[in-house]
Amino acid sequence: MSFNFLFVSAIIMQASTVSGFSHPNQAFCHIAETRTVSPYQKNTALFASSDADTPFNFDFGEFLKNIFGDDESASKTPAISTSEVKALFGLWNDALVALDPDAIAKRYASTTILLPTVSDLPRSDYEGIRTYFVEFCKRKPSGEILESTIIQGDDYCMDAGIYEFTMGTTGDKVKARYTFVYTYEEGEWKIAHHHSSVMPEALLAK
């Protein structure tokens, strides 16, 4: 049981006893009518006397905000435009072109999954992701998005479509389907899910 629940319950029961309410529900409804300005008023308003038959209206959400404050704005995911979502690929690709496995791995969220293009092994932690790109970077790849669809939700955004890698060591081009799902973590958008797979029809034609 949470501290907040115990704290609210104790306030309601105490208000019922001190203020002479016949039932804790009446005390609760009376508390919900109060408005706080200072810590002193927050404490004293809870125990103010009132006629139990007086009509009342209350907002439970507002009641909790009065006691515990409202930190909704602190945790709110910031808005991001379609063009900004597309630009997130550029940050990842810049690290790829720089052949920096650590910088690439840092683009992924603390809770993430990478289903890579040229490995059968899913990667779900920093070291696993870094190890994959150590090998992939040996080919000196550079990526380019050919087709992109952006989808946005309340606390995530997704870029999915088709991209193509040019391997600097050989000049070969590899086209693949991709999905990037981004979540907001530690002040920036990071990759929570990355799926990359070679175009299937080319494989089936062989």
Image (cartoon, grey):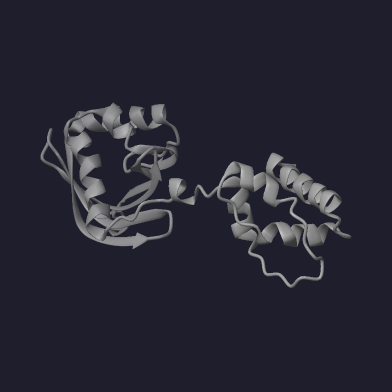
> Which of 71/17 is in front?
17
Q: Where in the figure is residue 14, as x and y percent of width and height? A: 81, 47
Horizontal side, residue 95 vs residue 185: left or right: left
Quadrant including the N terminus: top right
> Which of 185/18 is in front?
18
Residue 162's quadrant in the figure? bottom left
Residue 146's quadrant in the figure? bottom left
> Which of 164/37 is in front?
37
Residue plotted at (27% across, 58% down): 81
- The residue lying furthest to the right in this view is 22
Residue plotted at (25% across, 40% down): 92
Horizontal side, residue 171 vs residue 145: left or right: left
170 versus 21 height, above or below: above
Residue 192 in sight here: no
> Which of 195/26 is in front?
26
Q: Number of numbered discs present?
A: 0
Q: Where in the figure is residue 151, as x and y percent of width and height? A: 35, 62
Q: Where in the figure is residue 4, as x and y percent of width and height? A: 68, 43
- The residue lying furthest to the bottom in this view is 55
Residue plotted at (68% across, 45% down): 43
Q: Where in the figure is residue 159, as x and y percent of width and height? A: 31, 55
